[in-house]
Amino acid sequence: MDGDGIDNWKGTDPCQRIDAIMCIVDLMNKDSEIKILIGCTEEEKEKVYRFHNKS
């Protein structure tokens, strides 16, 4: 872990519930992180996924 805690992504869904958790593993930096998605639509979840899988 990078020591900065758990990151949150807040979406536009009116319910604003935790609806996904992503575990990110960065093999190049030998790092891992947890991302909690709150109130994200399916499109927003896909954007977060693509953002973290650029490399």
Image (spheres, rainbow, N blue to C red):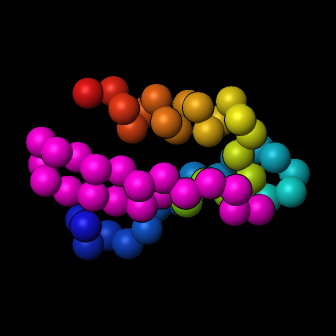
What secondary structure predominates along the stretch shown in magenta?
A: strand
Rendered position, 26 above or below 7: above
Reply yes or no: does residue 22 show up in magenta: yes
Q: How many marks?
A: 0
Q: Is residue 4 left or right of residue 50?
A: left
Asked if residue 4 is among those painted magenta in the image, a careful observer would answer no
Q: Quadrant of the N terminus?
A: bottom left
On the rendered image, what quadrant is the C terminus found in? top left
Tell me where residue 2 sits by quadrant.
Answer: bottom left
Q: Position of residue 43 (x, y in %)?
A: 68, 30
In the rendered image, the residue lying farthest to the right is 14
- Residue at 46% across / 29% down in the picture? 50
Residue drawn at (43%, 68%) of the image: 6
> Which picture quadrant has residue 54?
top left
**Position of 6 compared to 20: left or right?**
left
Across and down, in percent, residue 12 comes to: 77, 44
The residue lying at 77 percent from left, 62 percent from top is: 17
Q: Is residue 40 left or right of residue 5?
A: right
Q: Which residues are magenta?
A: 17-35
